[in-house]
Image: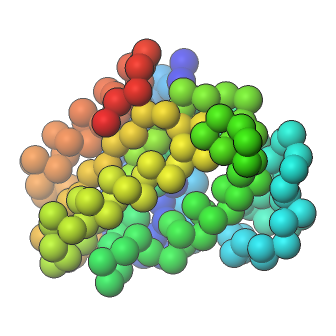
């Protein structure tokens, strides 16, 4: 059984990011899945205090729900972040989550990480209306590789464009097929680095 964390970073209830997380959670039934909807939690930005640095574990001085999520991220096999694209970038909540992975940062270690568990999978699923697809695909592929800091060594990124309405991703058979394929990849054993 794989431990998989699905993060919905959108502030919009019943939006595309929420639909993406719900569909993946359904496809991953039987796995140990944690769906984390950031809008429902106390998620504070990084303070840049550096109190988390030079430690063997991922501890943050803040007492919020992201700090409480860090042990689950350390133990997980995969992390998926679903984010809308705002002004050609992931939204501020997704950025907040990535910045709060700073307790994993450790210079001089493999992948600059203090994790005890490498080989994790990381995926970024972005939905947007009219952002240039080629630019957005390059940006998302680059962004997801930053999750190597938490022990990820296998990466996927998906961009679902031309879906301006809340939940419109569910009306696109091609996007649903991509999500089913992503769920299968998350469940599968991976031996070597991909993409």
Q: Quadrant of the N terminus?
A: top right
Q: Is residue 169 left or right of residue 122?
A: left
Q: Is residue 48 above or below residue 177?
A: below
- Classify the position of the C terminus by image quarter: top left
Q: Quadrant of residue 181?
A: top left
Q: Residue at x 32, y 64 (%)?
A: 139
Residue at the farthest left position? 173
Q: Name the quadrant containing residue 166.
A: bottom left
| Residue 54 location (% of width, % of height) | 87, 50
Q: Nearer the viewer, residue 110 or 79?
A: 110
Q: Residue at x 33, y 53 (%)?
A: 141
Rendered location of residue 25, percent (x, y): 43, 40
Name the residue: 34% across, 59% down. 140
Q: Position of residue 110 (x, y in %)?
A: 65, 35
Left or right of residue 183, residue 78 in this image: right
Q: Is residue 167 left or right of residue 98?
A: left
- In the depicted view, which residue is nearer to us: 101 or 163? 101
At 54% from the left and 44% from the top, the residue drawn is 148
Q: Is residue 18 in view from this perspective?
A: no
Residue ranking furthest to the front: 108
Q: Is residue 9 left or right of residue 194?
A: right
Mark yes or no: residue 142 visible. Answer: yes
């Amino acid at each position: 059984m794989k431990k998989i964390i699905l993060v919905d970073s959108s502030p919009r209830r019943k939006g595309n990011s929420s639909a993406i997380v719900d569909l993946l959670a359904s496809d991953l039934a039987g796995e140990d899945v944690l769906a984390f909807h950031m809008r429902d939690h106390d998620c504070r930005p990084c303070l840049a205090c550096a109190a988390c640095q030079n430690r063997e574990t991922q501890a943050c001085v803040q007492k919020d729900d992201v700090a409480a999520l860090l042990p689950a991220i350390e133990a997980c096999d995969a992390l998926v972040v679903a984010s809308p694209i705002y002004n050609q970038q992931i939204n501020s909540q997704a950025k907040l989550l990535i910045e709060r992975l700073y307790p994993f940062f450790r210079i001089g270690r493999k992948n600059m990480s203090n994790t005890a568990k490498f080989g994790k999978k990381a995926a970024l699923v972005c939905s947007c209306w009219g952002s240039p697809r080629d630019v957005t695909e390059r940006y998302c592929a680059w962004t997801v590789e930053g999750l190597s800091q938490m022990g990820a060594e296998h990466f996927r990124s998906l961009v679902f464009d031309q879906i301006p309405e809340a939940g419109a991703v569910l009306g696109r058979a091609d996007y649903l097929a991509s999500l089913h394929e992503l769920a299968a990849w998350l469940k599968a054993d991976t031996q070597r680095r991909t993409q």
